[in-house]
Amino acid sequence: MSLKSSNKIEENVWELEVAVDGETFMNAVNKAYLQQRKKINVPGFRKGKAPRAFIEKMYGEAVFYEDALEIVYPDAVSAAIEEAKLEVIDTPFDLEVPEMGKDGVVIKLKVTVMPEVKLGKYKGIKATKKSAKVSAEDVKSHINNMLEQNSRIVTVETKRKVKKNDIAVIDFEGFVDGVAFEGGKAENYELTIGSNQFIPGFEDQIIGHKAGEEFDVNVKFPEDYHAELAGKDATFKIKLHEIKVKEVPALDDEFVKDVSEYDTVDELKKNVKEELENKKQHEVEAEANNEVLDKLADLVTAVIPDCMIEKKMDDDVQDFAYRLQMQGLDLNTYLKYTGSDEKTFREQYKEQAEKQVKLDLALAEIIKKENLEVSDADLEEEYAQYAKAYNMDVDQIKKAIPADNIKPELLQRKAVDFVIENASFTAEKKPAAKKAAAPKAEKADEEKPAAKKTTKKAPEKKDAE
């Protein structure tokens, strides 16, 4: 087997002509005969026992040629690509076989190769790092969430009226022109007053009623509501069963002991601040690093073959489908729910795919330019990480995952680390505070009376009822 010729016929496309000698091809013909003879009947011979010469005489000399071609094709093409020193990135296409017989086979085909890449200055890429400072308000908000998560819903035992933020447990049924409409009825529905779950005006008319009361709520459906009810007046028959409230625990040392490993509020606040600072620091680092990588991708100049982008889009769609599957959904069902189709859904990944392909090409160039390599120590550390993640022995991991499958990803990581380490990060500047306008100068001979101090008394809180 040999490469007869290799020629670049267009950007990223080469045409190869491959020759397979007669002896190699005839050996493949005999192999094809041995594979196929059990399926061929020849008069005078038991099934599968007919000599090759008889079968060829009966069905023609070329009876096994197509099968023989399939046998020699993979090795012949692989050897030709290697001899041509081409980095092929897709399945060969436009296959032709101008010659095939006892003297051998000639195969013509086209292949898509890795594009030629020009990479701009990748050292010293500038990016901005935001502040990782955590404010007292951030800590307060986090602790308030903890209090909310540990709150409980209780029934109001006193015969008081509904007020905002209460949870009203109601039966309701809606009527338009005296006729009940579909979807307008529910029993023991828990409605948080002020949540704006229902159409405007509905929740406001629950306020002021007591548990056990039955009453009407009159509303008008918005003009942009669905067609059957849009703009129509409606009456809802309401029965108020009970009033519930959310009880949020007090922030004290007892609460802290119940929900954490700490003993005091101050200890909890200190820990929360540290955790938030660590989290924010990681987020800031990741955002700045992503900015560097985005700018790196923009430094790539290349004519990228469509197949590279298409393959990345396929990978992204498959990844999304897999994540859906983990949640008990399949992609077709998801597309049906969202009113989309596979082609439209797939297309939304195109821009992201183009960016990722450019980034991959940039990293590949850096690996070559900086002579980055994966050491044995790097591999051992990666295997140890896999073993820890899957709770398996390192030797088991090595048998399951060959080193050649790990090295490309490790090399890419090294390239990413190289770019990040050589990037130039600056702290984000806060916008300058606007200076207040200077007051107009007063006339020198004009005296102003001193401002009279007044003390306002805070208004007394009125009962919510």
Image (tube, helix red, strand yellow):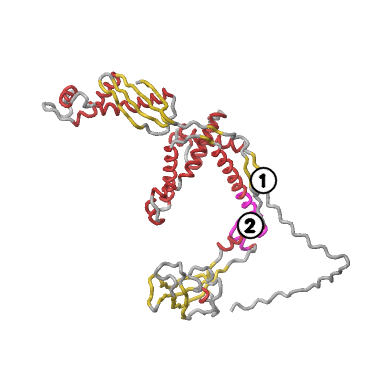
Residue 37, placed above or below residue 192: above
Give the secondary structure at mark 2: helix
The disc at residue 25 is none
Q: In the image, what residue type sits under mark 2?
A: Asp
Residue 84: x %, y % from top left: 42, 23
Task: Kindly identify the residue that appears in the image at 58 percent across and 37 percent down.
Answer: 417
The disc at residue 427 is 1
Give the secondary structure at mark 1: strand
Q: Is residue 238 left or right of residue 29?
A: right
Q: In the image, what residue type sits under mark 1?
A: Ala
Magenta residues span 254-279
Q: Residues within 10 Å of mark 1 (few under 14, many from 20)?
A: few
Residue 135, placed above or below residue 295: below
In terms of depth relative to the viewer, which is nearer, 399 or 294? 294
User: Which numbered disc flags the more N-terminal residue, 2 or 1?
Assistant: 2
Asked whether residue 329 appears in the rendered view, the answer is no
The disc at residue 138 is 2
Q: Is residue 56 left or right of residue 130?
A: left
Marks 2 and 1 close (CB-CB < 8 Å) = no
Q: Residue furthest right?
A: 445
Where does the N terminus fall, quadrant-wise?
A: top left
